[in-house]
Image (cartoon, rainbow, N blue to C red):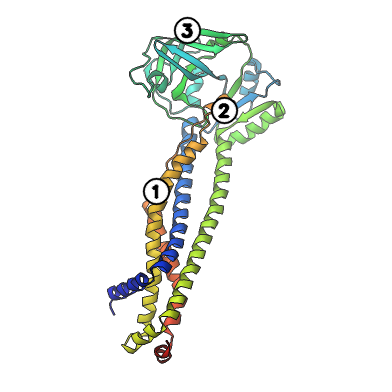
C-alpha cells in the first residue's frame, strides 16, 4: 500500500468523524498557539532589553534624594567621583516644562547635565545639526529630534539658532526662560528612562540659573564597567542608606529578565499541559475510532492489509490531527503574537505618572517569529499526534481479524 493511499484513507477517516476530529484538532491548535505566542513575545522583549542596555548604557546609575532627606551639592558630586569603580559623575536635572516657539506650544522633558557626560550616558546619541553644548553655555540648549520636528505636524518645526521659551513652575509662580537652539540631535528612539527625542537638553549652569537652586535633584554616575555597578550600588547604600532612590538600567533589566524568565517557564508548563491534554484527547479519539471500526479493520485484514498497513492508517490519522492542529495553531499564533505585542507595549507605557522618570517611560518591542520556531512547532504538533496515536494504532494492528469480522 502506497503512502499516498494511507494518507487519503486516514483523511477520509477524519472526515467521516468531523465533530470529534475538529474538537481534537482544537486542543492541539490551542497548545501550539500558546507556545508560539509565548516564545515570540519573550524573545521580542528580551531583544528590547538588550537594545535598551546598548542605547542607554549599562554602566549608568541615577541617584535621587527621597523627599525631605539629603540634598545633593557639588560636594556629593566630587565625593562620589572618587569612589572605586566610578568613571565619571555629574549633576542631573529631569523635569517637565512647557515649550513655546512661534505657533508651537507643547509639554516636553527638560534634561540638564554636564555636556561631556552625554556621550557616556547615551552612547548612540548623534548630533544632526549645530555644535555640541559646552559646560559654560547658559543661554543655549539642544533639542531632541521630535521636539525640533514634531511628527504630528511636520510643517511646524524649530530651526537651528532660533529662539525658544521654556515655561516652568517656580517656587511661587510660573516662570519663563528664553534660550537659543544651538544643536538638534538625530532621532534616538525611546528608552525606559530617557525619551531624548521629546526632550530639551541643557547644561548644569543653565539649569542652575533657571531654577535658582544650589541643590541638585539627581546625580548620574557612570561606572567603569558593568561588573562595577552592583558594588557601587552597595557603596551608595552604605553612604546614604534609604535617603536615596537608586535607578540602574543594568540591575532593573536583570530583575525584569529574571521575572520574565520565570513567567515564561510557568507559561511553557501551562502550554505543555495543554498539549498533554490534547494528546490524551487524540488517544481517546483514536481508541474510540478503533472500537467503532472493528468490523472495518477485519475487512481490511481480509482484503490482504497487513498489521503494518492497519497501524500506519491509524498513525496517519493521528499525525494528520497533529499537522492540521499545528498549522492552525501557527497561523493563529502569529496573529496573536503580533496583536499581544502591541497590547503589552501599550500596557507598559506610563501615560499618567507621578514622577518625571515614569512620565518618560516608553516601552515598545516586536515579537520575534523565526522560521525555526514555526518549523519546530509544526513538527512538535505532529510528534504529539503520532505519539498519542501509537497505542491505538498498535491495538488496531493486533486485533484478531476473525473476531473483528464477527463484531457488529
Using the numbered discs, state the Cα–Cα distance from disc 2 to disc 3 in whole angstroms: 27 Å
Q: Is residue 362 above or below residue 185?
A: below
Q: Which residue is mark 3?
A: 178
- Compare marks 2 and 3 and give the one earlier in the sequence: 3
- Compare marks 1 and 2 and give the one earlier in the sequence: 1
Q: Which residue is mark 1?
A: 335
Q: Is residue 9 above or below residue 77?
A: below
Secondary structure found at label 3: strand
Residue nearest the viewer, comparing 103 with 258: 103
Circle 2 crowding by C-alpha within 10 Å: few under 14, some 14–19, many from 20: few
Nearer mark to the viewer, of 3 and 1: 1
Nearer mark to the viewer, of 2 and 3: 2
Using the numbered discs, state the Cα–Cα distance from disc 3 to disc 1 in whole angstroms: 50 Å
Q: Are marks 2 and 3 in contact (CB under 8 Å)?
A: no
Q: Which residue is mark 2?
A: 353
Residue nearest the viewer, comparing 10 with 69: 10
Residue 190 appearing in the image? yes
Q: Residue 207's x, y, as percent?
A: 54, 12
Amino acid at each position: 500500500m502506497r503512502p499516498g493511499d494511507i494518507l487519503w484513507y486516514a483523511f477520509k477517516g477524519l472526515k467521516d468523524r468531523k465533530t470529534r476530529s475538529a474538537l481534537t484538532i482544537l486542543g492541539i491548535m490551542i497548545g501550539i498557539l500558546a507556545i508560539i505566542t509565548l516564545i515570540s513575545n519573550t524573545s521580542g522583549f528580551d531583544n528590547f532589553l538588550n537594545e535598551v542596555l546598548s542605547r542607554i548604557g549599562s554602566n549608568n546609575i541615577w541617584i535621587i534624594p527621597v523627599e525631605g532627606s539629603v540634598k545633593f551639592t557639588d560636594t556629593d558630586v566630587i565625593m562620589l567621583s572618587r569612589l572605586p569603580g566610578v568613571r565619571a559623575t555629574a549633576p542631573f536635572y529631569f523635569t517637565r516644562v512647557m515649550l513655546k516657539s512661534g505657533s508651537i506650544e507643547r509639554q516636553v522633558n527638560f534634561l540638564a547635565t554636564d555636556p561631556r557626560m552625554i556621550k557616556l550616558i547615551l552612547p548612540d546619541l548623534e548630533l544632526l545639526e549645530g555644535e555640541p553644548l559646552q559646560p559654560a553655555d547658559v543661554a543655549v540648549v539642544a533639542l531632541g529630534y521630535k521636539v525640533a520636528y514634531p511628527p504630528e505636524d511636520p510643517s511646524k518645526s524649530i530651526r537651528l539658532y532660533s529662539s525658544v521659551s521654556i515655561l516652568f513652575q517656580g517656587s511661587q509662580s510660573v516662570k519663563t526662560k528664553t534660550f537659543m537652539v544651538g544643536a538638534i540631535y538625530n532621532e534616538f528612539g525611546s528608552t525606559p528612562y530617557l525619551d531624548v527625542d521629546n526632550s530639551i537638553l541643557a547644561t548644569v549652569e543653565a539649569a542652575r540659573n533657571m531654577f535658582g537652586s544650589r541643590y541638585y535633584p539627581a546625580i548620574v554616575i557612570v561606572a567603569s564597567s558593568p561588573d562595577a555597578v552592583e558594588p557601587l550600588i552597595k557603596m551608595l547604600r552604605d553612604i546614604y542608606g534609604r535617603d536615596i532612590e537608586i535607578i540602574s538600567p543594568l540591575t532593573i533589566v536583570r530583575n525584569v529578565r529574571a521575572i520574565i524568565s520565570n513567567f515564561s517557564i510557568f507559561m511553557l508548563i501551562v502550554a505543555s499541559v495543554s498539549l498533554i491534554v490534547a494528546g490524551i484527547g487524540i488517544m481517546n479519539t483514536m481508541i474510540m475510532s478503533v472500537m467503532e471500526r472493528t468490523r472495518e479493520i477485519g475487512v481490511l485484514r481480509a482484503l490482504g492489509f497487513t498489521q503494518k498497513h492497519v497501524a500506519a492508517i491509524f498513525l496517519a490519522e493521528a499525525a494528520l490531527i497533529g499537522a492540521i492542529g499545528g498549522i492552525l495553531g501557527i497561523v493563529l499564533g502569529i496573529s496573536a503574537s503580533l496583536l499581544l505585542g502591541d497590547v503589552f507595549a501599550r500596557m507598559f507605557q506610563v501615560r499618567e505618572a507621578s514622577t518625571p522618570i515614569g512620565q518618560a517611560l516608553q516601552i515598545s518591542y516586536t515579537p520575534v517569529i523565526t522560521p525555526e520556531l514555526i518549523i519546530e512547532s509544526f513538527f512538535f504538533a505532529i510528534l504529539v499526534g503520532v505519539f498519542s496515536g501509537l497505542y491505538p494504532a498498535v491495538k488496531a494492528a493486533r486485533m484478531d481479524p476473525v473476531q473483528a469480522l464477527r463484531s457488529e
